[in-house]
Amino acid sequence: MTISSALNAGVTGLNVNASRLATISDNISNSGTYGYKRADVDFSAVSLTQSRGRYTAGGVTVSTYRNVGMQGSLTTTSNPMDIAIAGRGMLPVTTTAALGQSGGTYPLLMTSTGSFQPDKNGILTSQSGLALMGWPAAADGTIPPQPRDSAAGLEPVFVKLNQFAANPTSLIGLGVNLPAIATEAGGTGNPLEISMEYFDNLGTTKTMTARFVPTIPVTGQSNAWTMQIIDHATGITPIAEFNLTFNDTPTTGGSIATVTPVSGGTYDPATGRIAVNFASGPVEIEVGEPNSISRLTQMSAEFAPIALSKNGAPTGNLTSVEIDENGFVSAVYDSGFSRTIYQIPLIDVPNPNGLNAESDQTFSLSQTSGDMFLWDAGSGPTGATVGYAREESTTDIAGELTALIQTQRAYSSNAKIIQTVDEMLQETTNIKR
């Protein structure tokens, strides 16, 4: 009968508001939890078939979900591997309990933020038992091609604790001004030298010398030099030799005209670099492109360095691990260089709110979330990764307290319906006495 349906509707009202109260209490209690995504409810009316002009109350149903797509405010920290995402996307993680399993496969979870530190084995883990996942870099710091629709290439980020590493020199910038008067007839022909340090494959400091021997003509000025490259790791005998000529025209005076290899090396005019083989391996030396004054020049009467540079670094001890906005994790050494060791991709799904909520502010894929895709951080729909930062809870205390008042009133009103139906049924039973 209609009055009974009103009773059932009141009962469903109590149940759905109890569910809403549960989400509110969960949200408020996690207002200080980093990465917490607030729970919400969605009420839906139940309509029953009407007959003979009589209305039957169907009541209400409730569905609960996590608003994963909402992002909390970012707050700064002092840990370089506190990671947050400035926008859409999730960090790939797994449980530390799975690290000891054989087979090399790990259950994939995702989280919007995390605080990671190397554990005793060097795996970046959080206090809540999550291990950060990423793609390992090759020896040269590049990331090999990886599947984007699968977690097959991901592995726990491993940092070699207390490790030493060297960064050998592969490029030297040789910016020197040669005295123009040294190539005039009657010159002494004395060689001019400049020495620079470089770093070999073991991080040891070595020395190379560039020797410039002027070509003395019988008359006039030659504007020509012989450049010898000496690697003192192999002795004092030059390992390469080049003939240099310089321009003396009004528009290009003092710039390199030609670089001609004589022995032991090559020259690429497109890059302005010569390639030689030191004892530790191949090294490029930038001397400048033709008609350029970016490196070697011949002007005035002074022999002077202009811009000397080199890459590489001596042996260094690992001091920290940092992440940049594109998700590249770098090992930083006290000798002043850093090396890319992993890339952390960001996971995106078509329906983030359809993800299954797991413990420790993590989520897993579901049928309603859709298939995942691994993006480079900051590309596609994903935001940049931010180090030294955590994402705060998305709970709005003021909003939750307002919803709490509404829920309390709605619950009381539904209880009043049940009380009223009970009184009406009592009146019905009192008809016959």
Image (spheres, rainbow, N blue to C red):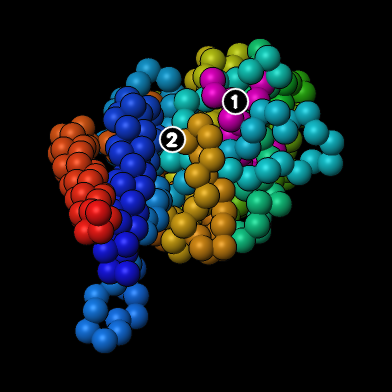
Vertical side of 236 occupied by 265: above or below: below
| Residue 218 appears in view | no
Q: Which residues are magenta?
A: 122-139
Vertical side of 217 occupied by 182: above or below: above
Vertical side of 274 occupied by 100: above or below: above
For residue 383, side relative to residue 213 (left or right):
left
Looking at the image, which residue sits at the far right?
A: 102
Name the mark nearer the viewer: 2 or 1: 1
| Residue 317 appears in view | yes
Quadrant of the image for the C terminus?
Answer: bottom left
Quadrant of the image for the N terminus?
Answer: bottom left
Compute the Cα span from label 2 to label 1: 14 Å
Secondary structure at numbered mark 2: loop
Where residue 116 appears, as percent x and y from the top left, is: 52, 25
Amino acid, disc 2: Thr
Magenta-span inclusion, residue 125: yes
Q: Earlier in the sequence, mark 2 or mark 1?
A: 2
Residue 129, labelled with which disc? 1
Residue 113, labelled with which disc? 2
Amino acid, disc 1: Gly
* Mark 2 crowd level (few <14, some 14–19, many ≥20, 10 Å Cα): many
